[in-house]
């Protein structure tokens, strides 16, 4: 991941999340919303990132819910990003998968987190 010198890594992440939301919205619009209801989201691992600057930067995005992912096997620095694009089944899955793809292409360590409701 290459970040311009005058651009903080937190601002870079926000900018990438903006692009991820656009891709998520476009993907969500394709097809119906059938299937099992779910709570799919994006699991992003950002070790050694400070929580407060991260949350301060991302709270500017009204379509993104961010919460810490705390599990014994995940280690510190993992976050759940939920890009709100409407829907409750296939639409949500498509949106989160598209957002994951954009974040991975930008160099972030993340995966789609699949959870059935």
Image (cartoon, helix red, strand yellow):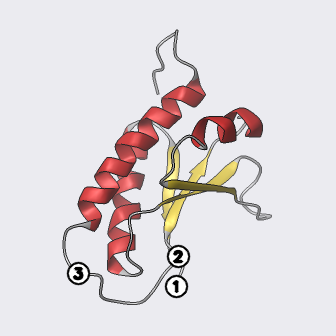
Evaluate if marks 2 and 1 touch, with contact meaning CB atoms under 8 Å apart.
yes
Give percent across and percent down for residue 78.
67, 52
Structural crowding at the residue carrying mark 2, measured as other residues with C-alpha within 10 Å and reported as few (<14), some (14–19) or many (≥20): some
Q: CA distance from mark 3 to mark 2?
A: 17 Å
In the picture, measured across the screen, residue 45 lies left or right of residue 26, that is right
In the picture, measured across the screen, residue 83 lies left or right of residue 90, that is right
Residue named by callout 2:
39
Q: Secondary structure at mark 1?
A: loop
On the image, which quarter does residue 103 sit in?
top left
Q: Observer-nearest residue: 69 or 84?
A: 84
Give percent across and percent down for residue 115.
54, 78
Give the residue at the far right of this rendering.
Answer: 72
Visible residue check, residue 8: yes
Which residue occupies 23% across, 67% down?
29
Q: Observer-nearest residue: 74 or 43?
A: 43
Which residue occupies 44% across, 33% down?
15
Q: CA distance from mark 3 to mark 1?
A: 18 Å
Give percent across and percent down for residue 10.
59, 30
Q: Which mark is residue 32?
A: 3
């Amino acid at each position: 991941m290459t970040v311009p010198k005058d651009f903080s890594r937190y601002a870079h992440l926000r900018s990438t999340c903006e692009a991820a939301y656009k891709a998520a919205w476009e993907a969500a619009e394709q097809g119906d919303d059938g299937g099992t209801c779910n709570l799919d989201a994006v699991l992003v691992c950002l070790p050694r990132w400070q929580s407060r600057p991260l949350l301060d930067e991302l709270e500017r995005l009204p379509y993104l819910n961010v919460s810490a992912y705390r599990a014994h096997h995940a280690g510190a620095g993992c976050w759940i990003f939920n890009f709100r694009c409407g829907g409750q089944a296939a639409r949500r899955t498509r949106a989160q998968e598209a957002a994951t793809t954009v974040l991975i292409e930008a160099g972030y360590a993340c995966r789609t987190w699949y959870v059935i409701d």
